[in-house]
Structures are given as structure tokens and as C-alpha cells.
Amino acid sequence: MKLTYAIAGLVAIGGIAAACSNRGAADPDPRPWAEVLAEDGLAAAERNLESQTETPETGFLLGGVRFLRAQEVILQIRYANHSGSLAFLPGMRAELPANMDGAFDPAFLERAMAAGLRHLGEAEAALEAAAEGEFAAEVPLDAIWFDIDLDGERAEWESLFAIMGGLGAAPEDGFDGVIRFDTADADWLAAYVHVMSGMAELTLALDPTPAIEAVFEGRQTMEAFGPVQGTGFVGDDTLPDTIAAVVTTFRGVPDAARTRAAHAHFKQMIAHNRAFWSKVAAETDNDREWLPNASQTSAFGVTVDEETAQGWQDVLTEIEAILDGEALVPYWRVSNEFGVEEGVGINIRKVFENPGDMDLILWVQGAAAAPYLERGRLANLEAWNRFTTMTRGDSLMLAAWFN
């Protein structure tokens, strides 16, 4: 997910939109939705699209704007808390400028994931209309910006392209800023919505706030006696705090309702991803594509030949087998082999369905893993290794893009 965190980096706020001057709140905005987006932001664009007649095109656009609002609200809460990046969580990887007025709240991560999840749920609902028929929608990516500092004004560092650039993703030279999304892309977006929703549900299932609060209060007490030292071998003096917060967060039993919801989202991601590849393979046009088939070109310079497309679908097949418990994940104390037809490994489906204590020490030692050990086929890394070879080292970036 490099670009993909990007697009999201894409990875979104339900933010505060600037009020439209000299226009009554009850009056419909006559401007095109993209103009509203560029001038007033995502929340105003959402209201504009909600006022339009529901069609597959408006359903896709509304779903996309709500998806971006999920990214925006996460970025807003991060910025307000002057917090660092957390690479594996949606919306938490993009680099943001320092906010000297930030005030840290130990509940920031819980608040960000909960707020993002609400917008993602609304995006999922809007995308149902996009599945009702074929469409094509031109989206000016340079009109997209996130009101991260909540001042209602667009700053260059808040633009989508600035966020993407910070994540190492940028369009090709000469790109005019417009992508022509079409029917297949609705499934790509829906898959991404489910990926982010699943990650948010898992974060909330672990209830990170008490652990962050304990670490934060301990650091404050230490700082009252003077500067807090680093680790000695890493200059960042927050590293011990981060490690302590993560290890403590994983202790205890997660909320099973949320882990089951995450499992369902990941399964939906696979279903929509498969639908996307089926639809995009049948396309015959070649017009400012987002993710192309082998006969198309992308505005971002991404090349997807038939072998790469099939390779990613093979990866998805193995991920689905793991989620379904049909392929077991090797556990280091009883097996260190992948791809064995008969071995002992962890049934991931059962972990999602009935999670036990997630204490990392107990998982390393084995007591936490033991209830989920079974004998059966062990997961195969062949598909992922083949995909990595085909994409010449770009596999992680493309995996994020493909979601």
C-alpha cells in the first residue's frame, strides 16, 4: 500500500467545511461538485452530491468523497494531537507538519478510528448505487484537499498531491490532474473501503486508550524531574513509549464483535477485488485510467500486464484460504515451513471469531497460540513470491494500490 496509503494517503476527515458565503444553508448549491470540492472542501462536496439525483455515477462520487472524508478526519485528529506517524494504520502514515498548538489526548487513536469508521460505513452505503449500472466519472484529483488544520482554508500541504508526494507516490509528468473512473473502479474503491474498515475495527477491538494513557501519564511524571532520555542506540526518545503502548495494548481479550466485523470486511475486500479484476479485464477503452488492464495505460505510470494481474489474484486466493481457515499459518515452535500439505499451524479464522488473550509475550511463547493450533495444509508463499518476482521489487506498492 504505498500509493494506496497515498491515495488514501489517501488514506480522511469528516471535517469542517468553509461556509459558503451569501448562500442560505437550505438552498442547493448550483456549482458543479468538483468546483465546490476545490473551493470549500470535502464536507461541502458531500452535501452537494447528496442533493443530486442518485445514479451509479453520483453513487461512486459520493462514496469516494466519503472515503476521503474518513481519511480527512483521521488526519485532523492526528494533527490536533501533534502525534507521529503509525505506518500500519489507515491515515496514520502520511507526514504532517508540526502543530505547536497540539494537545495530546491518549484517546486520539480510538477517536480517529471510530470517526473514520463512521465515514467509511457511509461510503460503503453510497457505493451500493454505483453497482446498479455502468458509469464514467471524471475526477480532478488536483481539486482534492484535506482541511487538516480545521481553518476552512486550503493550504498547499493539505492537497492530495502533497500527501501523495510525502508517501513516495506521484503522477507522471504531463498528467492533467483528471482521472476517468468507470464501472470497474467502484469495486476497487469498495475493496479499499473494506480494507480500511477492517483495520479500524481491529484497532478498536484492542481498546488502545488505557495503554496509551498509562504510558503518557508515566512519561509526564518522568518529565517533571527533567528531560527524558532515549534508548541509547536510537535517538528518538519516544521509542520506549511506543513499544510499551503497543505491547500493553495487545494484552487481554479483544472485542469479539469487532474482530468478527474486521474478518467480514476483509472477506468483502477479496470479493470486490475479484469483481474489479473481472470487470477491468473486459474494458476496451483507454482514457485516463486509474488501474489499467494489459491494453491500457495509467496516468500514474502503473503497468499491469496479464501475468501481474493474475499473480495478484493468486495472492488473494491464498489470503482468502487463510481467512477461511483452509490454510493454516505456521507457528515457529511447532513448524517453520510454508506450503506443506500436512502440518501444524494457526487457524486464523478461529482467532477472528473467538479471540483469546493477545498478549505478545504469550503469543511468542505459545500459550496464546495453542488454542488455535490445528493439523492441516499450511499457507503457501509461492503466489506472493511469484508476484514479487513479476513486479521487480514493486510488490508492496502495487499490493497497496491493488488493495
Image (tube, helix red, strand yellow):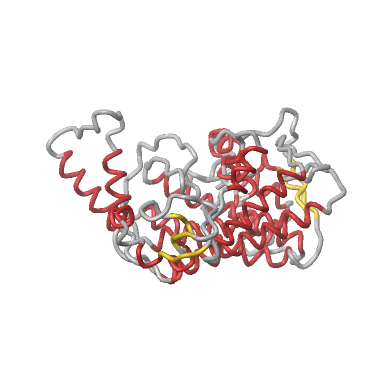
In percent of width and height, residue 317 lies at 63, 58
Position of the N terminus, as image quadrant, is: top right
- Residue in front for this viewpoint, 80 or 359: 359
The number of numbered badges drawn on the structure is 0
Identify the residue shown where x is 49% and y is 44%.
Answer: 148
Q: Quadrant of residue 53?
A: bottom right
Identify the residue shown where x is 67% and y is 57%.
Answer: 273
- Residue in front for this viewpoint, 333 or 128: 333
Q: Which residue appears farthest toward the front when viewing the image? A: 342
Q: Is residue 330 above or below residue 221?
A: below
In percent of width and height, residue 264 lies at 54, 67
**Left or right: where 123 falls relative to 346:** right
**In this rendering, does residue 119 appear at all?**
no
Q: Is residue 13 above or below residue 160?
A: below
**Left or right: where 101 falls relative to 259:** left
In percent of width and height, residue 45 lies at 64, 54
**Left or right: where 218 falls relative to 39:** left
Q: Is residue 164 above or below residue 276?
A: above
In percent of width and height, residue 195 lies at 56, 56
Identify the residue shown where x is 66% and y is 42%.
Answer: 143
**In this rendering, does residue 248 appear at all?**
yes
**Left or right: where 38 falls relative to 117:** right
Q: Quadrant of residue 303?
A: top right
Q: Quadrant of residue 238?
A: top left
Q: Which residue appears farthest toward the left when viewing the image? A: 225
